[in-house]
């Protein structure tokens, strides 16, 4: 296998199992589970929980964790892993009390979903205990790990925000300053919180594995941790109650799946942006991909305009389907795809967000004048395929600078309310019991050869854009997995951001500068407002991929060097 990756990394291949995760120690934690006989779900949960410790600026142990699982028997399901607004949330509170903005702090908190999501996955499809899969996370929190470049950069950038709360500063600004690269980073309180859950599981172990998992769950959602969480949030003016915690259960949601060139592409539902990946793929296919050279001006124009159309429909229609009537079947229908494609000018970029085709759309914010978007650096990802053919795809998330740590616990409760619009009339508007419209969106491809490819990335609104480009690099251009990941990427910002304050950059196209100057000039000539990224940047996402190949018996894996991600196989 020839590999020409600019980082020098090869595609990792094995015959038994493979994992790729957003931090190398998370990959190691999951791989240890695989080597110990655990399946893809056990390993994915171990890695996902570890990411909340290893990337605490990007992922919270008490954040969100959307999960896709494909079992060896072909069964596919999604575990939403996304909390809802507390029941007592006044739907107009942000319009009435906060001037139509989403404030920093506890009022943007929703019910923490990740602990329930991991335990739900273990209950339904895993084989191991919570203590087994939490061992790596606890060790990394208790003993610490080396501060790496992205963590140091992220904390430095947000140091004023971390200093807002003394308990956040104690963790993220030890000694009054951000940690430096190579210094030990520890989270003792978080280790104690996870250990408490494990201890409760062990105390109930005589009742069997299910009783133990329930005890670990109750320790977080009903026991001492829940009481500390609720007491603190109420004292700070938030809405989360003990009943919100005790009654929470992640929804088992239907997946969204569409055929493409003999493959089947699978995403979560429109409570996240996943279906927009499918829509963009289908629009690009309708416009015509064959004959276009990789990363040529015309190819990048087609991809960008297809993404604009899909992200317009995300803006106009996507939201929690329990509250919002999302016309998903229509949006993914051949007729609608054809109408979106027909509205695209192959010789000229649309100057902003494409107009609605269904309904009246939404009121767009004014164009943002800053030179670059204010990127919220949150989210990570893990993909696993095991020796039995089970596959796991999860995108845990939630940062730690815009909400306070619950004192004494090390826990950052999900601030994902920042992805709801303050106006309850918006499809993704606030309502009690409603889930925010999530950017994290794990995906999979069932290949026409009979293999499976879990893949995903951090990156907010860049997620489906990076995923689309890497998927096409592998399945359309035939690249090896690692080469497909490392190839230079672009991202459009020609839509309102999913994050407060919902910035809008009409026509903006960010381009990694490894793409030649003449290509960038041609994109400008097509009407794109091209902004150069560095040659390789974490802003372009961090795509992780595992791909099984039945014809050879190999499982291939790759990880994005744009962040500290690594893949391991055996």
Image (spheres, helix red, strand yellow):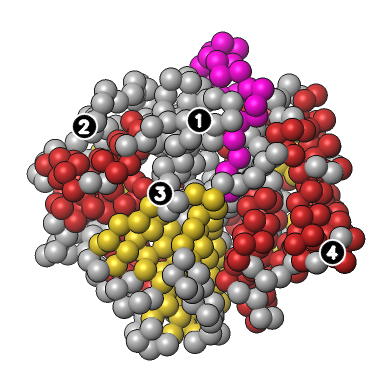
User: Can you see residue 413?
Assistant: yes
- Residue 555 location (% of width, % of height): 45, 80
Q: Residue furthest left?
A: 347
Determine whether the residue tagged by mark 4 lies in a helix, strand or loop: helix
Decide: marks 2, 1 in contact (CB < 8 A)?
A: no
Task: Report, in whole angstroms, how far the alpha carbon at label 4 lies from the one at label 1.
Answer: 41 Å
Q: The N terminus is located in which quarter?
A: bottom left
Label 4: few (<14), some or many (≥20) within 10 Å? few
Mark 4 highlights which residue?
A: 207
Is residue 104 highlighted in magenta? yes
State whether residue 236 is above or below residue 539: above
Task: Report, in whole angstroms, how far the alpha carbon at label 3 lies from the one at label 1.
Answer: 16 Å
- Residue 258 location (% of width, % of height): 30, 57
Q: Residue at x 63, y 22 (%)?
A: 89
Q: Residue at x 42, y 78 (%)?
A: 548
Q: Nearer the viewer, mark 4 or mark 1?
A: 4
Task: Report, in whole angstroms, how far the alpha carbon at label 4 lies from the one at label 3.
Answer: 39 Å
Question: Foreground: 368 or 343?
Answer: 343
Determine whether the residue tagged by mark 2 lies in a helix, strand or loop: loop
Mark 1 highlights which residue?
A: 420
Q: Nearer the viewer, mark 2 or mark 4?
A: 4
Q: Which residues are magenta?
A: 81-105
The numbered mark at residue 274 is 3
State whether residue 370 is above or below residue 492: above
Q: Quadrant of residue 554?
A: bottom left
Q: Residue at x 19, y 36 (%)?
A: 350
Labels 4 and 1: the sequence-earlier one: 4
Mark 2 highlights which residue?
A: 357
Task: Report, in whole angstroms, how far the alpha carbon at label 2 lies from the one at label 1.
Answer: 23 Å
Q: Nearer the viewer, mark 2 or mark 1?
A: 2
Q: Is residue 539 left or right of residue 394?
A: left
Question: Foreground: 98 or 564?
Answer: 98
């Amino acid at each position: 296998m020839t590999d020409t990756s600019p980082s020098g990394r090869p595609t990792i291949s094995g015959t038994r199992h493979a994992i790729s995760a957003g931090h190398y120690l998370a990959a190691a934690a999951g791989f240890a589970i695989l080597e110990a006989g655990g399946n893809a779900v056990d390993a994915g949960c171990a890695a996902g929980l570890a990411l909340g410790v290893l990337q605490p600026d990007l992922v919270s142990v008490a954040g969100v964790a959307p999960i896709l699982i494909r079992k060896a028997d072909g069964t596919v399901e999604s575990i939403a892993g996304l909390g809802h607004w507390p029941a007592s949330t006044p739907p107009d509170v942000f319009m009435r009390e906060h001037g139509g903005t989403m404030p920093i702090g506890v009022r943007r908190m929703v019910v923490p979903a990740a602990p329930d999501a991991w335990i739900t996955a273990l209950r339904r499809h895993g084989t191991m205990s919570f203590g087994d899969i939490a061992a790596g996370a606890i060790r990394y929190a208790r003993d610490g790990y080396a501060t790496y470049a992205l963590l140091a950069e992220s904390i430095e950038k947000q140091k004023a925000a971390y200093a807002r709360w003394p308990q956040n500063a104690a963790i993220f600004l030890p000694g009054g300053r951000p940690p430096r690269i190579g210094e030990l980073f520890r989270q003792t309180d978080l280790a104690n919180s996870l250990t408490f859950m494990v201890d409760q599981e062990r105390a109930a172990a005589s009742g069997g594995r299910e009783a133990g998992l329930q005890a670990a769950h109750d320790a977080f959602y009903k026991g001492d941790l829940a009481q500390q969480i609720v007491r603190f949030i109420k004292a700070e003016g938030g809405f989360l109650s003990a009943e919100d915690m005790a009654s929470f259960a992640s929804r088992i949601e239907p997946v969204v799946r569409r055929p493409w060139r003999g493959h089947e592409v699978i995403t979560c539902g429109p409570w996240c942006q996943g279906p927009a990946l499918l829509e963009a793929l289908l629009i690009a296919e309708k416009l015509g991909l064959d004959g276009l050279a990789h990363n040529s001006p015309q190819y990048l124009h087609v991809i960008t305009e297809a993404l604009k159309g899909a992200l317009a429909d995300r803006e106009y229609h996507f939201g929690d389907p329990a509250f919002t009537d999302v016309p998903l079947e229509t949006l993914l229908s051949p007729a609608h795809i054809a109408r979106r494609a027909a509205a695209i000018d192959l010789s000229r970029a649309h100057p902003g967000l494409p107009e609605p085709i269904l309904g009246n759309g939404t009121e767009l914010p004014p164009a943002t004048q800053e030179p670059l978007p204010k990127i919220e650096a949150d989210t990570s990802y893990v993909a696993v395929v095991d020796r039995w053919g089970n596959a796991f795809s999860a995108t845990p998330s939630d940062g730690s600078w815009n909400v306070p740590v619950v004192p004494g616990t090390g826990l950052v409760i999900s601030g994902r309310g920042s992805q709801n619009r303050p106006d309850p009339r918006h499809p993704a508007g606030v309502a009690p019991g409603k889930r925010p419209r999530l950017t994290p969106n794990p995906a999979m491809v069932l290949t026409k050869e009979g293999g499976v490819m879990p893949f995903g990335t951090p990156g907010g609104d860049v997620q489906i854009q990076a995923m689309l480009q890497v998927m096409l690099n592998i399945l359309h251009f035939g690249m090896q997995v690692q080469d497909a990941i490392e190839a230079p990427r672009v991202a459009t910002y020609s839509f309102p951001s999913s994050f407060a304050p919902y910035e809008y950059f009409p026509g903006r196209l960010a381009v990694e500068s490894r793409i030649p100057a003449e290509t960038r000039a041609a994109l400008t000539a097509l009407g794109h407002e091209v902004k150069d990224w560095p040659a390789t940047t974490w802003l372009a996402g961090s795509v992780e991929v595992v791909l099984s190949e039945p014809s050879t018996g190999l499982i291939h894996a790759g990880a994005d060097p744009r962040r500290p991600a690594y893949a391991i196989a055996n």
